[in-house]
Image: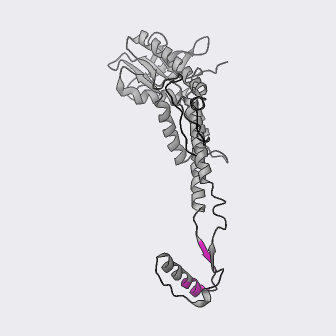
Amino acid sequence: MLNNPITFSDQMIMDYFNIQPAEVKGQNNKTTAYYKRMLLNKVFSVYNFDLPDKKMLAWFRFWLFTWGSVAYVDTKSELGWVFYPYSTTALNYIYFPSEIEVVLNKEKTEPISAKIGEDAEIVYLVDDRFGIMDIVNRYAEMLANCDKDININLMNANVSMGAYADDAKEALEIKQAYKEATDGKPLVIMNKSLLFDDSMKPFFKDVKGSYIANDLVVTRRAILNSFLTEIGIRNTNYEKKERLTTSEVDENNDETRALVLVWFDNLKECFKRCSELSGEKMDVSLNYEYINQDDIMDVEVEA
């Protein structure tokens, strides 16, 4: 059973509690915010929107993908028909909006009331009218955690040297001698009492053994590929190091098509209703071919 369409205030409350800190969640940080923006733009790249007013493209995509739906409403003013966020004031028998309200500017205009099918339509992506930020947030958190772990591992991979000294004078002598040696001086003069076998050793005993940055990079790529598969962008299994055949490259095509075609069908039907109601031409197309391509040759992946 479909949930009732949620209001903007409901969505704002959900988003507020989503950013609260937890031990295994990391939404409220700059890296996660970066990945959210990056992943959303990847979603945008799947679709090509033909709108009556090209200036509204960025506005339309933001509300459609982050909030799940956007109204196409007749403002009965010089603005004409516009895409705009809305609140639901009445539901039909299957709990979809039948009457909505749009506030263009609460300081200058009264709210616009409209009836679906008469002077407004709803463009939505998913059947339940929710957006895709649950998907974006999930992958943004994981990618941000990968970046954090990579940075920590790179810091720990510094091959710093440690030395023991009996007093401050001896420590200064060792420090000066090490500076001269690493500066490339051909002759370094130091107190002979400092020349013993264990005077200097790596600060971390097994740098190579604890270096996992390469594995983390592969993991990050796998997470990104999983996201691309969900939103409809083909990708290759980079974990396989030998030669890939065409069928292996295309093996996730059915997964790649799964969500994108459902979203696409919804958008096509919504735009059809909007065009018939307003008389304005609008449409959506996909930027990728979701069929097997016979001309794809075998792909070489270096070991």
Is residue 106 at all visible to an observer of this figure?
Answer: no
249 or 67: which is nearer to us?
249
Measured along the vertical axis of the image, is residue 158 above or below residue 135?
below
Give the answer, above or below, for where 114 lies relative to 85.
Answer: above
Q: Is residue 194 left or right of residue 85?
A: right
Percent position of residue 29, x then y: 55, 48
**Magenta segment:** 161-173
In the image, what residue occupies the spot 64% across and 67% down? 204
Q: Can the viewer see residue 167?
A: yes
Task: Please state which of residues 66 and 118 is positioned toward the viewer in this rendering.
Answer: 66
Outermost left residue: 78
Q: Position of residue 44 (x, y in %)?
A: 47, 30
Work out whether residue 110 or residue 258 is closer to the camera in this orientation and state it: 258
When asked about the image quadrant of residue 283, the answer is: top left
Q: Residue 144, how many percent across, how many down?
A: 57, 46
Q: How many marks?
A: 0
Q: Name the residue rendered at 60%, 34% in the picture.
A: 14
Residue located 58% across and 67% down the image = 159
**Per the image, is 172 magenta?**
yes
